[in-house]
Image (tube, grey):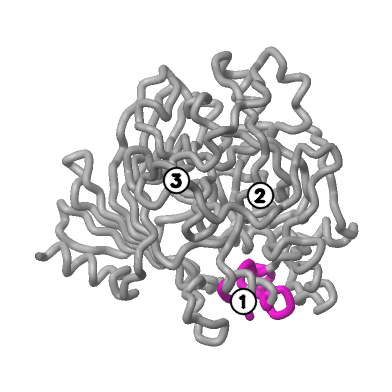
Amino acid sequence: MQRKTFLLGFTAAALLATGAAQAAVSADEAAQLKTTLTPLGAERAGNKDGTIPAWDGGLKAAAGARMGDLPVNPYPADKPTLKIDAKNLAQHTARLSEGTQALLKKYPDFYVNVYPTRRSAAAPAYVYDNTLKNATRCKTKDAGMSVEGCFGGVPFPIPKDGTEVMWNYLLRVEPESANYGFRNLVISADGVRALATRNDIWWQYPYFYKDGSAETWSGEYFLERFNATEPPYKAGESLVIRDSIDAKNPRQAWQYLVGQRRVRRAPTVGYDTPDFVASGANYFDEVQGFLGHLDRYTWKLVGKQELLIPYNSNVLVTSKVDEAFGKHFLNPEKMRWELHRVWVVEATLAPGKRHAVPKRRFYLDEDSWTLALMDGYDAEGKLWRTSQVPSFAMPSVPAVLQKPAAVFNLQAGTLSAVQMLNDEPFKVTPRKAESFFTGDAVAADAAR
């Protein structure tokens, strides 16, 4: 489908770039981060008709109930200003992704509640300082598959190509460490919801260590370890993942299986391997919208677009499980959609590579660099999959974060809801020793 996009401030050459090595921007260009751009690289100004307001510093505090450290509703006075459903879809296609339009056409009871746009994205002062430094020192290398000179902030706040935007996503703002429980749930084509797994998870982000630096950083940007607690036959299984900017060895993974009573390397945990944590209902690199390395695709920066995306979705992610779902989708009454400027990046299968989804289109929020929506296309170019990634405001960091993702298989009529936080407290925690995130640590704990 031909879609109208709004290209803001790019040369033709930049728009055609697909991942070649890029130099850092000049000091003069970087100075925009203190004037016309936010400290993370978004446009400070609102849009012409006022439906996107100017950025005023983001959300730094929120009153009311919490689930762990997560506010249940940072904007309790807000009400929907527009409801989009199949009946009025034709009036709003310019501001809806192809995947969202497909859901509106497929499910008559699905709708989009549009709320006032709240530019809640913020970051700690040290992240702003590091982002300014990164603008003039951070570069891509290995044909865009790795980076150098980056640390502790958005690597490319003034991006010039698709790989730079995707590195901004992979190295988006996160707390040093977080702990929470999550559920993976699968909804069949006939609307039956089933629990795949319930897990306790620990994440750690060495890239954002407050006492780190570009010179001392190892290149590992996130460490993950989780243990399954449900259903009973999976209880005790563990998975450890360590992701790195190393283009030759971007991921190390270990799995503990209770039946085998041993830890083994798990080199297939990634890309388009079916996600066994979700009963194989999605691919591993569809977790959190996109999780993994960039090397299976070439990445084209299409430009910017004003788009309705799930945003400030605290109400949804803190709801009870039964309240968070409709029959075939996330509960529209709990979902919050807002109009934001997004970066649009198209991923096309790279020469000599393979992936079950040969083409994807990503929509990334300009304020937070979180991924909001993803559309996946089959070998014939037909829309096959679409993902909604409901980000949520976390003023205690401060940041806009993303964890849950709803992965729709439009052809099969199924939904895989991954890392849902419902009924689970989300906590920002002191960081652990990095040895906790190893196969040896999992084996030692299993032996006790």
Q: Residues within 10 Å of mark 1 (few under 14, many from 20)?
A: many
Q: Is residue 35 above or below residue 423?
A: below
Q: Amino acid at mark 2?
A: Asp
Query: In this figure, which residue is indicated by the disc labeled 1?
Result: 150
In this rendering, position of residue 17 left or right of residue 404: right
Outermost residue, bottom side: 215
Give the percent coordinates (x, y) of residue 2: 81, 33
1 vs 3, front mark: 3
Q: Quadrant of residue 194?
A: top left
**Callout 2: SS:** strand
| Amino acid type for the residue under numbered disc 1 | Cys
Residue holding disc 2: 365
Is residue 222 at all visible to an observer of this figure? yes
Q: Is residue 135 magenta?
A: yes
The span picked out in magenta is 133-155
Secondary element at tag 3? strand
Label drawn at residue 71: 3
Q: Residue furthest right?
A: 12
Q: Is residue 157 left or right of residue 426?
A: right
- Say which residue appears at 50% left-offset and 86% top-offset: 216
**Residue 125, quarter of the rendered image:** bottom right
Which residue occupies the foreground of this view, 193 or 203?
Answer: 203
Tell me which residue sits at (26%, 54%) in the image: 227
Q: CA distance from mark 1 to mark 3?
A: 31 Å
Pointer 2: residues within 10 angstroms few (<14), some, or many (20+)?
A: many
